[in-house]
């Protein structure tokens, strides 16, 4: 038992000795490390360098492009309305939505039976009026002759009275003969007056007959016009829209049955802000005839048409802002009334500006310029225009210097950068055309043929391109984006 106790005490003392030796060794090692660290020279901190893409600033004149969106309208369109009431008995071939017609073509006929009956009655009435006028003219001639005969007889009676008075003065005649001659002369004068009254009545009848003839002619002209209104003709060559009529249908007068649009006389209406409108005005305060491009995005094909700015709206609609402008489309191939298009207006030239990406301009109105030893400098500039993803800026003393393309949170004034210029690493050119396998080509063709929103002429061009050996890569990408692939 005594031996066991002594062994435990020895073991405890041995463990305590080993622990104290380990602590002493750790203390010595820590002291040596501290001594070595104090003897080594301090290393200087290394400055961090960031990479930044830069472009040179080139100042010169620029013609900004004002971009807006508008709707294609027709400069020449009329409403087709029923010219008369009745039953539609015939329609022209192609009298339907999208049908093409030529000027003077008969579009529809309304049952003309009633109008023909009215015309026949008017012609008969005109014949009666002409007969009545002829009779009135003959009556006037007879009345004039009757007046002439009565005046002749009155002259004879007057001469007889004079002869009887002469005889009485010479003592040959008698007083009774003179009285009889006087009575006969008075009766003759009364007859002349009666004949003149008859002539006046005949002349009045002639004037009434003449007036009645004019009225009958007017009635005949009205009947002919009503008969002509049973046919609707095209005022000019164009296409039909909104047709709502069928053969056998009863229509009322002035009922709208469609519209006739001239597809070659189109214009685009678009709205811009007041400040943009002010920039377009010339020295006289008017909108000049500026060049305009009208662009319709159709499944990978931008259908562009040249246009000319013609006028601005005469008034601002209540509750609206800005200005509404109109541009005449010169060659509207593929464009139709109602198309929603993008409009690019070429603004007047702006002198001494530089075009840089919009990401180069900070919210504080400054850009970062590459300075000495490739350190960045913050320089304030004036923003002149925004042009899509670019901006036009103007500054002093920046000609030929290089600006950072895209500002990031780590870039600022005084930062050392590694400039990356566009000529340092040119990206590989994307192929303009690509070859399609049969399955991919078939899917694209089926998508184009089954899409009812693509105009016929655009669809034909797309199918022609898809059937070629090499297809434009842009067309393929836009079609596949519509397909969701």
Image (tube, grey):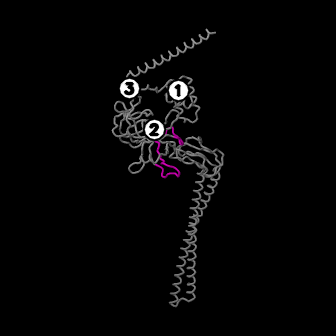
Mark 3, secondary structure of its residue: loop
Residue, far bottom: 171
Q: Quadrant of residue 338?
A: top right
Labels 3, 1: front one: 3
Q: Nearer the viewer, residue 200 or 467?
A: 467
Residues shaded magenta: 312-340
Does residue 367 lie above or below 285 as drawn? Answer: above
Q: Where is residue 325 in the image (x, y as percent from the top left)?
A: 47, 47
Asked if the magenta segment contains residue 136, the reply would be: no
Quadrant, the C terminus: top right
Q: Mark 1 points at which residue?
A: 467
Label 3 or label 2, whichever comes before in sequence order = 3
Q: Which mark is residue 44?
A: 3
Q: Where is residue 70 in the image (x, y as percent from the top left)?
A: 50, 43
Q: Where is residue 217 in the image (x, y as percent from the top left)?
A: 57, 59
Q: Mark 2 points at which residue?
A: 388
Pointer 2 local density, CA inside 10 Å: few below 14, some 14–19, many at least 20: few
Q: Residue at 50%, 23% (x, y): give it.
A: 435
């Amino acid at each position: 038992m005594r031996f066991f106790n002594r062994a435990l005490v020895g073991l405890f003392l041995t463990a305590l000795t080993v622990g104290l030796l380990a602590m002493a060794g750790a203390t010595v090692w820590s002291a040596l490390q501290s001594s070595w660290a104090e003897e080594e020279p301090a290393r200087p901190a290394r400055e961090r360098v960031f990479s930044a893409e830069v472009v040179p600033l080139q100042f010169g004149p620029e013609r900004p492009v004002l971009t807006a969106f508008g709707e294609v309208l027709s400069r020449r369109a009329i409403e087709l309305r029923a010219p008369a009431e009745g039953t539609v008995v015939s329609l022209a071939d192609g009298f339907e939505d999208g049908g093409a017609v030529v000027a003077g073509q008969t579009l529809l006929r309304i049952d003309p039976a009633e109008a023909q009956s009215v015309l026949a009655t008017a012609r008969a009435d005109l014949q009666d009026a002409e007969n009545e006028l002829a009779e009135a003219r003959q009556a006037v001639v007879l009345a004039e002759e009757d007046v002439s005969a009565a005046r002749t007889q009155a002259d004879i009676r007057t001469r007889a009275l004079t002869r009887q008075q002469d005889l009485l003065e010479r003592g040959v005649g008698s007083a009774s003969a003179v009285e009889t001659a006087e009575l006969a002369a008075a009766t003759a004068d009364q007859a002349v007056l009666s004949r003149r009254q008859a002539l006046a009545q005949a002349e009045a009848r002639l004037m009434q007959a003449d007036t009645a003839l004019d009225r009958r002619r007017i009635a005949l002209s009205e009947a002919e016009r009503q008969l002509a209104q049973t046919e609707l003709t095209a005022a000019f060559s164009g296409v039909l829209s909104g047709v709502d009529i069928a053969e056998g249908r009863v229509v009322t007068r002035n009922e709208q049955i469609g519209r006739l649009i001239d597809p070659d006389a189109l214009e685009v209406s678009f709205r811009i802000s007041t400040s943009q409108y002010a920039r377009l005005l010339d020295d006289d305060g008017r909108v000049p005839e500026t060049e305009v491009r009208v662009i319709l995005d159709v499944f990978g094909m931008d259908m562009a048409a040249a246009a000319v700015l013609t006028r601005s709206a005469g008034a601002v609609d209540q509750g609206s802002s800005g200005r509404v402008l109109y541009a005449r489309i010169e060659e509207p191939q593929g464009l139709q009334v109602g198309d929603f298009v993008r409009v690019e207006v070429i603004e007047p030239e702006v002198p001494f500006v530089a075009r840089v990406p919009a990401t180069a301009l900070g919210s504080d109105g400054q850009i970062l310029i590459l300075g000495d030893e490739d350190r960045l400098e913050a320089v304030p500039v004036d923003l002149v225009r925004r042009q899509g993803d670019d901006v036009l800026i103007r500054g002093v003393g920046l000609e030929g210097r290089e600006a950072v393309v895209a500002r990031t949170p780590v870039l600022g004034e005084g930062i050392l950068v590694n400039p990356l210029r566009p000529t340092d690493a040119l990206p590989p050119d994307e192929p303009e055309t690509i070859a399609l396998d049969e399955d991919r080509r078939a899917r694209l063709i089926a998508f184009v043929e089954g899409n009812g929103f693509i105009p016929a002429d655009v669809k034909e061009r797309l199918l022609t391109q898809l059937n070629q050996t090499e297809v434009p890569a842009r067309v393929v990408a836009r079609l596949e984006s519509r397909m969701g692939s």
